[in-house]
Image (cartoon, rainbow, N blue to C red):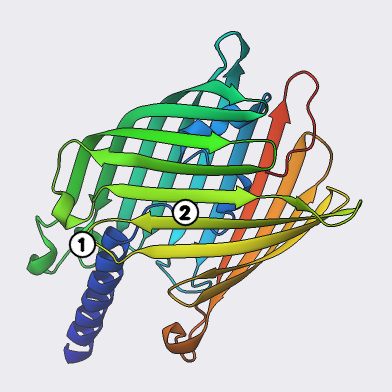
Amino acid sequence: MKKHLYIVLLAGVALQLWSNKAMAQEPFTFTQYMNDITPINNAYSTMDNAGNLSAVGRRQWIGINGAPSSFLFNGSVPIAGIGGAAGLSFLQDKIGSENLTEINAFFAKKVQLSGTNFLSASINAGFRNHKITYSTLDPTDPSFQNSDVNETIPNLGFGVMLYGSNYYVGLSLPRLSLGGNTSQGLPNDYYLTSAYITNLGSDFKLKPSLLLSYQGTALPLEYNIAATLYAKEVLGVGISYRNDSAVAGILSVNINNNIQFGYSYQFSVGTYALGGLNNTSQELTLSYRFGKNVVTKLL
């Protein structure tokens, strides 16, 4: 009996720790953000004159039951007649008995400033559903009864981006919570994103990129810096560093002008590494671009 109670107590504490972390962390934690930042700044969608379908799957703490996992899908189509784009994004985060689902539709419009320089703005609207089923931990324990959470709130977001043929810089607020208990884990998210491509001879290109995220008092300012080296616009090899001491190796392959595949392996170093625990994260991406005169896209 004591052993049973100890296991339940341990599971409850672990779940609470995981839940607090998940509820406080930003929804967008994908390592390969630099390949498609449409989910956090919809204005980015106007940079592409082709239609796009993109999916990302991420698993953390491989081999541990209830470990965090995420799935992200987004798609967009250009509206050439007005210099715009429209699309849809779907995100699902799971950790233990907690599940966060988010669906948004968006519209973006660009204006030409000069030459190849454009300014784009976007708006998105949708909803988020936050669900925690504490009762599944131990249905016979009264402390877990009537404690489940199931909250759905509307969402609104905005983005703006300045870009050219070899760079972009953008600001966005993709998650402006219109209701619900934001202090319990659904805070607003602010992002600054940027990237630049430079030629290193005729066969190589280098793309440094930056992602800054801020949630007010929910989390300190978080940054992710990365650099990807492309060979003949086919193979990309990169590395990224996040300021919670997470390092990742990134591989991307442009199979042709339409299909891109990506893989990343992330692990913690320094004081954030969990001794004896597999705290790595793996991520797979697949994107398909369609339409007339589709060309390889690196930025």
Which structural element holds mark 1?
A: loop
> Could you tell me which residue is drawn at 49 percent across and 56 percent down?
211
Most foreground residue, 148 or 191 = 191
Q: Residues within 10 Å of mark 2 (few under 14, many from 20)?
A: many
Q: Image height check: is 60 above or below 126?
A: below
Q: Which mark is residue 187?
A: none
Is 112 on the left-hand or right-hand side of 94? right
Mark 1 vs mark 2: in front: 1
The residue type indicated by label 1 comes to Thr
Q: Which residue is mark 2?
A: 70
- Image quadrant containing the N terminus: bottom left
- For the C terminus, the image quarter is top right
The mark nearer the N terminus, 1 or 2, is 2
Rendering coords of residue 119 (x, y %): 51, 29
* Image-quadrant location for residue 98: bottom left
**In the displayed structure, does residue 9 sit left or right of residue 214?**
left
According to the picture, the residue beneath numbered tag 1 turns out to be 217
**Residue found 78% across the figure and 27% down from its top:** 294
Q: Are marks 1 and 2 in contact (CB under 8 Å)?
A: no
**Type of the residue with mark 2:** Ser
Q: Is residue 11 left or right of residue 28?
A: left
Location of residue 101 in the rendering, given as x and y in whole percent from the top left corner:
35, 43
**SS at badge 2:** strand
How far from the left and from the top, in percent, is residue 243? 45, 72
Quadrant assignment, res 247: bottom right
Question: Residue at the spot x=69%, y=36% of the render?
Answer: 165
- Observer-nearest residue: 54 or 48? 48
Note whether 84 is above or below 14 in the view shown. Answer: above
Residue 47, placed above or below residue 185: above
**Can residue 29 be seen in the rendering of this structure?**
no
Residue at the (45%, 37%) spot, across then down: 90
